[in-house]
Image: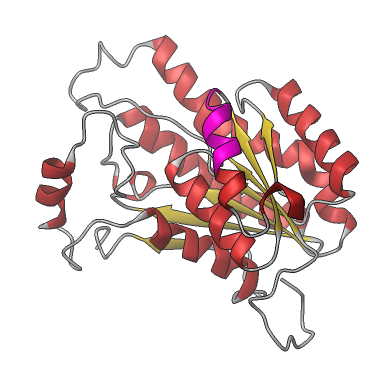
Amino acid sequence: MTGGAAMTNPMDLSGRVAVVLGGSGGIGAATAQAFAAAGAAVVATWRSDRTGAEALVATLPGGAGRGHAALPAAVEETPTLVALAAEAERRFGRADVLVNAAGFTEAVPHGDLDTLDDALIDRMFAVNWRGQFAAVRAFRRLLEAGGNGLVVNISSIAGLNGAGSNIAYGAAKAGVDVMTKSLARALAPRVRVMGVSPGVVDTGFVPGRDAAASAKLAQAIPLKRVATADDVARAVLACATLLPYSTGSTVLVDGGRAL
């Protein structure tokens, strides 16, 4: 995560603090595990599943005794993000990486314009776009303080191909891709901003998508399988370790589905 300086082990994140919003979810939990395994102290946030987040932290290398923490945050409620940043600073004195992995969706056929009503559209953007921006705003000072901060926004190939669970979700993720580029320019050189864009992921994120549906979707993917949460987490970790000269880019983790 450093600039031009050589690193004897670029995968060693000892002494760094990674905040994973949505840390109790599938991709978020796998990302928390990956960063902890690389030596970072991890803050995994939860919105409603406190028990799950605390259980996750207990499984991280070193457990809570290493400094890992499960803290509350609701990305659609900006005051909770401001409070989260303050608590991270109080406990750790720093935050080096912010992973925006919180989100939600609902399956709505693209031709069903009535079901995608104003309330659902507003919630889609509040959670999947505004919340990510608000998190960066809340953590900006801490990320800049170390001189080599990193934001990783979890996007989706729905933002590229206009497919996905519903039209508003795809539009919000397209907005995340633009946000990643804009913030990369605005926050350089002290903070890099990257995106990771999964295709179909075997996490249960999309309500109603069972194993049979995933298996059917896999046949249309060039690599003939859906992604695992670990596939996505490895890409997020790479942004922090193996790609120190990249910013404003979005890494596809889709098995070729966007082709």
Q: Percent from the top left, x then y, of residue 49?
A: 53, 27
Instruction: Write the residue at 58% across / 28% down.
Output: 50
**Horizontal relation, residue 114 to residue 66: left or right:** left
| Image quadrant containing the C terminus | bottom left
Q: Percent from the top left, x then y, of residue 89?
A: 87, 43
Instruction: Write the residue at 56% across / 65% down.
Output: 237
Kindly tell me whether residue 123 is visible in this rendering.
yes
**Horizontal relation, residue 171 to residue 185: left or right:** left
Location of residue 148 with respect to 85 vertically, above or below: below
| Image quadrant containing the N terminus | bottom right
Q: How has the structure been colored for display?
A: secondary structure
Instruction: Write the residue at 69% across / 75% down.
Output: 12
- Number of marks in picture: 0
Q: Percent from the top left, x then y, of residue 233?
A: 48, 59
**Horizontal relation, residue 128 to residue 105: left or right:** right
Is 113 in front, or is 28? 28
Is 64 in front, or is 224? 64
Q: Percent from the top left, x then y, of residue 201?
A: 31, 49
Range drawn in magenta: 48-55
The secondary structure that most of the magenta stretch takes on is helix
Q: Is residue 113 magenta?
A: no
Kindly tell me whether residue 100 is visible in this rendering.
no
Instruction: Write the residue at 18% across / 37% down.
Output: 210
Location of residue 51 with respect to 58 vertically, above or below: above
